[in-house]
Image (cartoon, rainbow, N blue to C red):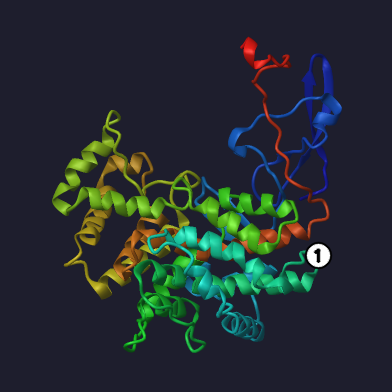
């Protein structure tokens, strides 16, 4: 954030107040209202904080009009096309792309931390067998603070580093164990000879009774899903992690809070909603009917996985994800899966229809990631856990950044109070 040079004048009841204006390296100027209440005795009102910057950050930048997503200045399509998830993790955590030696050391560290404390296996068994994997993840990640006491002191830079590595390394293991527990299969231990994405797929789909080979096309597609969901600026779950962190909570509690927020269907459930929509459509021959319904303003049906709240013209992540979806479907085929066949036909129909182009209802990253996860064999209940696993590094990077900011303070939003003013208590016999 640049030195303040510009100001804005706010006039209330004839009294004028000068408010500083900060100019970022990218994006719109920001009006600094931190001293407004002290000077003028008024708050601002911004439900959802959609016009309020709650922090400054150097991690991720989004321009929704341009369809631009940058991590530390690098475009997401370049990172997803040329890099891989653990290299992007390093970039988000430390601000620069690693050297070959730095990346090798980082990958070795993450690989050697993938096992969880053996006693945590018993913690999983305390959940009902039909517990949603996200419920299990919220509980288990929060419980990590009971197993890893040596990395909960947020004032110690070394402990913060260890906690960061542990969360990135162990989240695939926890997510895979949550899945295995939900389907009644034995847990599969992580393997140090597999890369990050392949190891996750192995823990999810291997069984002790036979050898399981991870296809490199599926591993690459999984890695891209991780990369494309790694961070997305100050969204609801990231803001939740920052708010929890502002109280001084330990890192495992903060990330568990982020997972809980992500679980909300308005946030992390978009790709699941997309697959449920495809199941409702049923088969390709029903697509014209649902296309017509989507155009009808009086019909409640909406196409899920099309358009985006932030991106107004196109989702920069979707182009790379579409490539992976095409590769996965070519490998696995769609002949015996009506959902995937419907998805391919719906994509083609929507892209060819001028109505959707005019309304900017383009297939987004959730549309393609849902298709990929379905093709791989994941149930929809695992879509959000995969999202949480992917986003962990973003949450941790934002958490570390906030703790290193000398100006950070505990979050305390204000309110527009519309309730009763002071009144006297009435004894119960007189009510």
Image point (43%, 78%), residue name = 187
Relative to 320, is 300 above or below?
above
Relative to 206, 341 lies left or right: left
Image point (62%, 50%), residue name = 240
Image point (70%, 61%), residue name = 250
Q: Nearer the viewer, residue 305 or 337?
A: 337
Count of picture labels = 1
Residue 225: percent from left, percent from top? 44, 66
Residue behind mark 1:
155
Q: Hey, which residue is sitting farthest front in the picture?
A: 429
Q: Nearer the viewer, residue 140 or 303?
A: 140
Q: Is residue 178 visible?
A: yes
Residue 105: percent from left, percent from top? 65, 85
| Quarter of the figure with the C terminus | top right
Image point (55%, 73%), residue name = 120
Relative to 192, is 222 above or below?
above
Q: Hey, which residue is sitting farthest left in the picture?
A: 285
Relative to 10, 252 lies left or right: left
């Amino acid at each position: 954030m640049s030195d303040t040079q510009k100001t804005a004048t706010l006039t209330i009841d004839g009294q004028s107040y000068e408010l500083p204006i900060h100019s970022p390296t990218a994006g719109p100027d920001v009006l600094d209202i931190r001293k407004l209440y002290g000077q003028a005795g008024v708050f601002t009102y911004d439900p959802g904080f959609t016009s309020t910057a709650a922090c400054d950050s150097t991690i991720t930048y989004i321009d929704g009009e341009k369809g631009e997503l940058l991590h530390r200045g690098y475009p997401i399509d370049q990172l997803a096309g040329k890099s891989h998830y653990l290299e992007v993790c390093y970039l988000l955590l430390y601000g620069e792309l690693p050297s070959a030696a730095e990346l090798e050391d980082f990958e070795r560290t993450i690989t050697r931390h993938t096992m969880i404390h053996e006693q945590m296996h018993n913690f999983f068994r305390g959940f009902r067998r039909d517990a949603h994997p996200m419920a299990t993840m919220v509980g288990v990640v929060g419980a990590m603070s009971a197993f890893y006491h040596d990395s909960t002191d947020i004032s110690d830079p070394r402990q913060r580093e260890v906690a960061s590595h542990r969360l990135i390394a162990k989240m695939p293991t926890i997510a895979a164990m949550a899945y295995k527990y939900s389907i009644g299969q034995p847990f599969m231990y992580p393997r140090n000879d597999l890369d990050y994405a392949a190891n996750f797929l192995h823990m999810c789909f291997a069984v002790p009774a036979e050898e399981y080979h991870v296809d490199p096309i599926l591993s690459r597609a999984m890695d891209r899903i991780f990369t494309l969901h790694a961070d997305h600026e100050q969204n609801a779950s990231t803001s939740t992690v920052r708010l929890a962190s502002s109280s001084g909570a330990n890192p495992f509690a903060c990330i568990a809070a982020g997972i809980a927020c992500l679980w909300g269907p308005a946030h992390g459930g978009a790709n699941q909603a997309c697959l449920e929509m495809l199941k409702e459509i049923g088969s390709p021959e029903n697509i014209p009917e649902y296309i017509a319904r989507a155009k009808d303003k009086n019909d409640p049906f909406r196409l899920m996985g099309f358009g985006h709240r932030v991106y107004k013209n196109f989702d920069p992540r979707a182009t790379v994800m579409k490539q992976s979806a095409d590769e996965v479907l070519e490998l696995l085929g769609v002949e015996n899966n009506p959902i995937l066949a419907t998805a391919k036909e719906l994509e083609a129909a929507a892209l060819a229809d001028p109505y959707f182009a005019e309304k900017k209802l383009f297939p987004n990253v959730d549309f393609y990631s849902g298709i990929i996860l379905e093709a791989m064999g994941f149930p929809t209940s695992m879509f959000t856990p995969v999202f949480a696993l992917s986003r962990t590094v973003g949450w941790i990077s934002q958490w570390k950044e906030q703790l290193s900011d000398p100006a950070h303070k505990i979050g305390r939003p204000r309110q527009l109070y519309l309730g009763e003013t002071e009144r006297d208590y009435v004894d119960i016999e007189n009510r």
